Amino acid sequence: MNEPFTRWIANGTPADNSPSRSPSPLPANDLDLLDAYSRAVIRVVDTTAPSVVSVRGRKNEGPGGSGSGFLITPDGYAVTNSHVVQGRRELTAVTADGDAIDADVIGDDPATDLALIRVAARDLPHAPVGDSQLLRVGQLVIAIGSPLGLQSTVSTGVVSAVGRSMRGLDGRMIDNVIQHAAPINPGNSGGPLVDTRGRVVGVNTAVLLGTQGLGFAVPSNTVQWVTTEVLGHGRVRRRQLGIVARAVSLPRTTVRELDLLSDVAVEVVEVVAGGLAARGGLTEGDVVVAVNDRIVAGVDDMHRVLARVPADSPLELSLVRGDRVVRVILEDG
């Protein structure tokens, strides 16, 4: 893993027709709770907001939009959304102090809607990246960004759900997406979702239009993986089998006779010449039921499994070929 990541209220209505009375003072312990909540948010904003930037094209040129981002190292590396970058290589990052600084795109990964950029400055405030696996439903989270161009806007909410899935810009599923209730709007995209300790736990990526309280963030663990891949290899490495495939339902007799664990699998529609599958002997009509002993009941399942296998590790495919199950080992090189 890359080194930067290893360091790093109640206003009541009278129940009858009697004259209204002034609300009773809140109990002292309720006031303490309110103060604790406020202090937590203020502390996070004070420590994290300086690391948040507004991202746009240089001189507002290019097809992409504008959004937010956040610095993760003092020497200018920052994270934003792929759909904010949208193919551009040169950007402008505006800091919380209003300084407009040139930034270059280091890596862009539409499959996770993440991009790594580098701001042309040093000794910058930066935010620590936390462990999104530790998030719990109901936990307080804080979103910081530039919705509608309003710099350093803060909103709060709770984690509504974890483990959601949504499609990235290239059609792949992004797994373990965080659903939260911190209000976000256009321009929040790419900004951090932060816990009460000031650790980034997600990158805000989408809000469902026509809804309220439904925001989504790519988890910070995905951010760490993508960033490490980009810094180490210039891109995110993913296994490519070299096939065109589709999900198919298997006949019950086949499932029973071959003792399969799912009645849905992935049929090979086309094998790309020279690809990994072609070198391993896969043919049109083969039906993949498992990869490395993990059931694949659709193309999305296959993408998920391939994303978890190291780029230099062999793949073992279990195939239904004719009236039997065969195992094929695929290795690069």
Image (tube, rainbow, N blue to C red):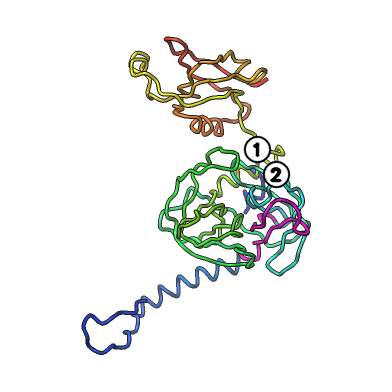
Q: Is 67 a magenta residue?
A: yes
SS under mark 2: strand
Residue picked out by circle 2? 107
For residue 36, above or below residue 2: below
For residue 182, above or below residue 28: above
Specify the farthest residue to the front.
210
Left or right relative to 67: residue 307: left
The boundaries of the magenta stretch are: 49-73
Give the quarter of the figure containing the C terminus.
top right
Residue 173: horizontal and vertical position, in percent?
52, 39
Left or right relative to 8: residue 177: left
Mark 1 neighbour class, 10 Å CA radius: few under 14, some 14 to 19, many 20 or more: some
Out of 49 and 177, give the one closest to the viewer.
177
Choose top left, top right, bottom left or bottom right for residue 92: bottom right
Q: How far is mark 2 from mark 1, CA to CA? A: 8 Å
SS under mark 1: loop
Residue picked out by circle 1? 236
Mark 2 neighbour class, 10 Å CA radius: few under 14, some 14 to 19, many 20 or more: many
Give the quarter of the figure containing the N terminus.
top right
Residue 29: horizontal and vertical position, in percent?
36, 76
Q: Earlier in the sequence, mark 2 or mark 1?
A: 2
Look at 56% across and 15% down and name the residue there.
282
Choose top left, top right, bottom left or bottom right for residue 10: bottom left
Circle count? 2
Residue 132: horizontal and vertical position, in percent?
51, 50
Kind of residue indicated by mark 2: Gly
Kind of residue indicated by mark 1: Val
Q: Is 157 a magenta residue?
A: no
